[in-house]
Amino acid sequence: MIALSDVSVGFDGARALRDVTLSVARGERLGIVGESGSGKSMLGLAMMGMVPDAARIAGEIVLDGTAMSGAPERVWRRARARKVAMIFQEPMAALNPLQRLGETVMEPLLVHQGLGRSAARARTLELFDEVGIPDPEARLRQYPHEISGGQRQRVLIALSLTCDPALLIADEPTTALDAHVALRIIELLVRLADKRRMALVFISHDLAAVARATERIAVMYGGEIVEGGPTPAVLAAPRHPYTRGLLGARPGIGGQTPGRDADGRRKRLPTIPGSVPPLSLLPAGCRFAGRCAVELSHCAAVRPEPYRLPDGRFAACHLLGAGT
Amino acid sequence: MGYFLLRRTVGFLATVLTITMVVFAVMNILPGDPALTILGIDASEQALAALRAQLGLNDPVLVRYAAWIGDALTGDFGTSHSYRVPVSELVLERMPLTLSLAIGGMVATVLLALVLGIGAAANHRKSGDWGVMFLSQIGIAVPSFWAAMLLVLLFAVHLQWLPPGGFPGWSDPVAAVRALILPVAALTIVQAAVLARVTRSSALEVMRLDYVRTARAMGYPRQRILWRHVLPNALVPIVTIVGLQFASLITGTIVIENVFYLPGLGRLVFQAIANRDLPLVQALVTLFAVIVVTVNFLVDVIYVMIDPRLKARA
Amino acid sequence: MNRHLTPNLILGAILVALVVGVAGLSLIWTPHDHALMNIRERFGAPSDVHWLGTDQLGRDIVSQLMVAARNSMTVALIAVLMGGSIGVALGLLASALGGWFEDLIMRVADIGFAFPALLFAIMLSAVFGPSLWVAVLAIAFINIPVFARVTRGAANVIWTRDYVAAARAAGQGRFAISRDHILPNVAAPVIVQATIEFAIAILAEAALSYLGLGAQPPSPSWGRMLSEAQTLMFMAPQLAIYPGLCIMAAVLGFSLLGDALRDLTDPRLTRSRQA
């Protein structure tokens, strides 16, 4: 559905994304995890053609069979909502506070789909029903501040589905929500992706959420994908020290005892020491160097190549190449 | 909502009452003898005494104030010395022209400022933005009466497209509108310069917000995002400034009427000063100030109407 | 380049220096006596003798503009100083006393905003007859609520600071604290506001003297020069240009300088502008 190869996004000197390669097929659900500042949100925006004006973007993006690299804004604009749609973290802030929910969801139907008002209204009611909004008739006339966070996120999901996109990007869709509400939203997204044969890119720092929502996972650090593969396999036996660190920071995920390294030795990593440095201060080699618990002497200087593992997994770490 | 309106209305009425006190105090308590001012220093002592008695100047201040307010509540705003007719009659006769000028100026100001401000924000840090900012900086520094004179120089003296001043009356609507074009333009230049800046910065704030990103992510055309999503949300501070600007719009109208010799309230108040017509001045100044606070009161109410979140809270 | 030296600051400072310099120079020197009439040389074109020509009475335009600059600056200075000091005092008092007194002051200040300078000038002119002092008083009046509000806002912040708490604990009274701690710390926003109000005062003075409520003949003022020029617009349009340009330069200078000073003294604003 979408394929990125060697996509980089740079802001004068600093690079927010470095040589990101990934693809998502129709009906497939991909998770992208990482701490804040890892570049995962920038990756989502790059897939929408919405990187900031000041950024320079390089590499290939193929969306639904069309090469979008270097495409002008109007080409991207035609692809948005119809081929690729996106929902965001803060459902209160993401909805126009002065628009009734009905108007918000009807807008793309009127603007893009050319429906009349009554048809758009009927379609909106169907969509509200599909995303599990109770009493859709009453919701049409309400404003965003009048409904709960979970309901707002459902409205945003309904909005994103208006033009039947083939790919839905969800950037931290559950972060601002209570745990049980978040769970329901995840279930909804999974069901929608399966039913509509829609590709789903689920961006989150919450490994539990990604574990539930996705089949494949890509772990990002410093603007790079450092590890990838089937979600259960990666979370059960992470190979990159960073992924292990993330798992250690959130114990009890994926049925794996936390803090166990590749050899099964107990190695407590309650949190990853330090925080993601500013983009301009990242090392030239492995970007995790400096925070890594098992760093080698050449890690900061030499960039590790993705090391391929069985069952389509890979990880970019010198430790794997060195056979440790 | 009801409670908010009630509280706001009480505040508004208190403000109006205070305004009448301030005007009355300035014009009646400050040292100075209105009778002497009216009749001039050559007047005889008998004439002065007679006029003082006629004006009620021998009564205590509070009695005079109460009489003034009491009469005003029954629609009697006093009698003009120089015109020898009730003030209310004069005001009603001159009011339509002043209101046309003020409302025309306000509408033109808002339209021009929104187009320039939103246009500048949409072209942030590009030449269009710098151009609008430069023009508005100049516009703020230009006195409205000078802008009016320059317009007259160009369009009346040089090109001779429009009349340089005067007002033919409403019986000939085309001529009346032609006579108002330059005055409205002069008012607009200065007012729009301020409002365009406010619009621009308010729009820039809104353009950073998440729901504008949502609108972009939905692939809406740029113009639609600007006018349907950014502008309505940017309106709250714009409406505030429009309300605050009304004070300077009233000033501007008074000045512009005098530049173009338009027989409205602004011209009337200057004739009243020239004629030493104190009751007329007192009534007109009160009227102008009350118009200003009334507009600000309405702005507060409009606020609540454009923002559903405030409606819920109020 | 120093990031504080913004184009606003440079242009504003240059214009202000120019206008104030010319106004100061007029105290000791003008090319001609500004009031000297010479009917034979009326409407003279610019020349070596009269750089910008002469007016309808043959008076030298440059000399009149220079004296008018001095008058304009004097009116603005006195009015802003008068209104500013009363406003600052009221603001400090409101902040120091708090409670109903603060509410009252602020409510009255709100009402003050309903009176543009012109309305005050109209009232005062009706009572006393028009004069330069009417213009000064009217502009001073409208400055009182502006400064009261700015001062009170800034002072309320300072009152929460630790060193104020320390001074209170040491037994210093509210008025002494206002004088020793609050006043020096509200100086920056007050000076910024004064610069901006100076620009507004110049505009107001020009409008008032244009309308005949300000400087009276023979004392020259930009506004009155324009109102005289207006009656001669068909005959001598050039007379309607120079005084307006002077007003514009003076107002632009003070408002640019005020904006630049505000950016310098309000780090919060500057940072958001860089972002």
Image (spheres, coloured by chain):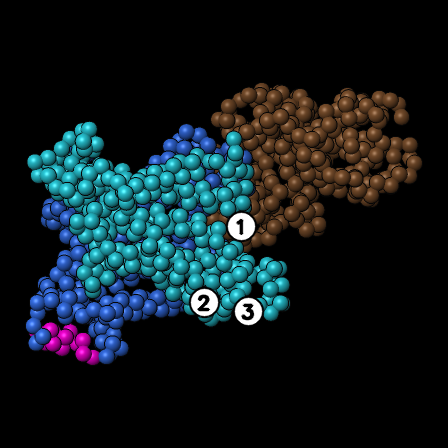
Which chain is displayed in cyan in the rendered image? Answer: C
Magenta range is B47-59
Q: Type of residue at label 1?
A: Pro
Residue position marked by numbered label 2 in the rendering = C103
Amino acid at dot 2 = Asp
Front of the two marks 2 and 3: 3
Q: Position of residue C135 (x, y in %)?
A: 26, 55
Task: Report how far apart the C-alphas of labels 2 and 3 lie in the structure.
Answer: 21 Å
Q: Which chain is blue?
A: B
Q: Are marks 3 and 1 in contact (CB under 8 Å)?
A: no
Using a 10 Å C-alpha cutoff, classify the residue at mark 3 as few (fewer than 14 neighbours), some (14 to 19) or many (20 or more).
Answer: few
| Mark closer to the observer (2, 1) | 2
Which label was assigned to residue C173?
A: 3
Front in this rendered view, residue B167 or C34: C34
SS for callout 1:
helix
Give the quarter of the image for residue C21. top left
The image shows residue A167 at horizontal and vertical percentages of 61, 31
Judge if badges 2 and 1 mark residues of a common chain.
Answer: no
Q: Position of residue C156 (x, y in %)?
A: 52, 60
Real-space Cα distance between discs 2 and 1? 36 Å
Q: Identify the subunit bearing mark 2.
A: C
Q: CA distance from mark 3 to mark 1?
A: 51 Å
Q: Nearer the viewer, residue C262 or A162?
A: C262
